[in-house]
């Protein structure tokens, strides 16, 4: 039944297929997925929110049914049936949301090449973010109490301004423009080490930020320094000549 639901959602919502690797050598492409325990984590969150919303409705409905059953209303069965129908609808909506949770878990992708990474998530709104390694400023790992129980982590990649491009259905969006999340992964340290190693290799090979390399080459160019010294010497000579002629 779930497979039929998934196929229906993919057709109706036009969910794109597997994402393409980001810029870089395809031979270095590594694909990571959220851990199975991340689905359990999402189910726990769904259970908490569902219980918080349905429990008051059950209590209120039960009180109404008891009151109607003891009242002198000539048609209490109709009202009781309506209340039960509303409860059934709420339960069906909750089960639908659970199926969507499973679909969101399956449609989460983390792809890393030797030059960049790409994160895709979402079902109703598909969000995709591509980050160039040259723009990465910080990589951190976090873990909440429930995540510690399940053995999963969130890896956060922060970029400089303009370091990431986030899209939703092909359109640019402003949400999380400078932060990419690898949510619910088991091997966060391995992924962080991989990104750091490839970032270090990128800088060592001279393929980092072009503007930075340009400034560095300007600062260390011997020809430029010699030309500046020559101009400085000529300026001093010209000033001395002008000072002598004025006297």
Image: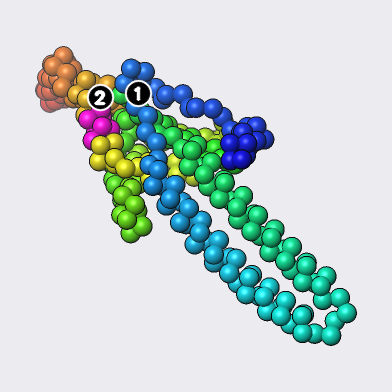
Mark 1 residue element: loop
The mark nearer the N terminus, 2 or 1, is 1
Q: CA distance from mark 2 to mark 1?
A: 15 Å
Label tally: 2
Is the C terminus in the top left, top right, bottom left or bottom right quadrant?
top left
- On residue 202, which mark appears? 2
Q: Main secondary structure of the magenta part?
A: helix
**56 or 159: which is nearer to us?**
56
Q: Residue placed farthest to the top in the image? A: 223
Left or right: residue 103 versus residue 83 is: left
**Residue name at image x 50 percent, y 59 percent:** 47
Q: Is residue 210 magenta?
A: no
Q: Quadrant of residue 117?
A: top left
Q: Nearer the viewer, residue 81 or 163?
A: 81
Few, some or many C-alpha atoms within 10 Å of disc 1 (few <14, some 14-19, many ≥20)? some
Few, some or many C-alpha atoms within 10 Å of disc 2 (few <14, some 14-19, many ≥20)? some
User: Quadrant of the image for the N terminus?
Assistant: top right
The image position of residue 58, as x and y in percent, is 63, 70
Q: Residue at x 29, y 36 (%)?
A: 191
Q: Position of residue 13 (x, y in %)?
A: 64, 36
The residue that mark 1 highlights is 29
Which of the 4 image quarters holds residue 201?
top left
| Residue bounds of the magenta highlight | 192-199
Direction from residue 238 to residue 19 in the image, left or right: right
**Vertical order, 185 against 235 (above or below):** below
| Whether residue 181 can be seen here | no
């Amino acid at each position: 039944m779930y497979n039929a639901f998934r196929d229906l959602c993919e057709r109706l919502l036009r969910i794109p297929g597997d994402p393409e690797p980001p810029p870089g050598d395809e031979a270095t492409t590594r694909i990571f997925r959220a851990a199975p325990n991340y689905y359990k984590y999402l189910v726990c969150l769904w259970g908490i929110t569902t219980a918080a919303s349905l429990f008051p409705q059950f209590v209120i409905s039960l009180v109404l049914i008891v009151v109607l059953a003891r009242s002198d209303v000539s048609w209490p069965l109709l009202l009781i049936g309506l209340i039960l129908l509303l409860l059934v609808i709420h339960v069906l909506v909750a089960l639908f949301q659970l199926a969507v949770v499973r679909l969101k878990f399956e449609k989460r992708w983390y792809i890393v090449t030797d030059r960049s990474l790409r994160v895709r998530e979402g079902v109703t709104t598909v969000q995709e973010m591509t980050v160039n390694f040259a723009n990465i400023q910080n990589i951190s790992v976090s873990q909440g109490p429930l995540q510690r129980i399940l053995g999963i982590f969130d890896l956060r990649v922060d970029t400089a301004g303009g370091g990431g491009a986030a899209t939703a259905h092909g359109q640019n969006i402003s949400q999380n423009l400078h932060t990419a999340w690898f949510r619910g992964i088991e091997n966060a340290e391995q992924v962080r080490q991989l990104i750091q190693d490839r970032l270090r290799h990128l800088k060592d090979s001279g393929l980092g930020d072009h503007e930075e390399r340009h400034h560095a080459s300007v600062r260390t160019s011997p020809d430029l320094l010699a030309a500046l010294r020559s101009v400085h010497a000529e300026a001093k000579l010209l000033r001395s000549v002008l000072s002598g002629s004025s006297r």
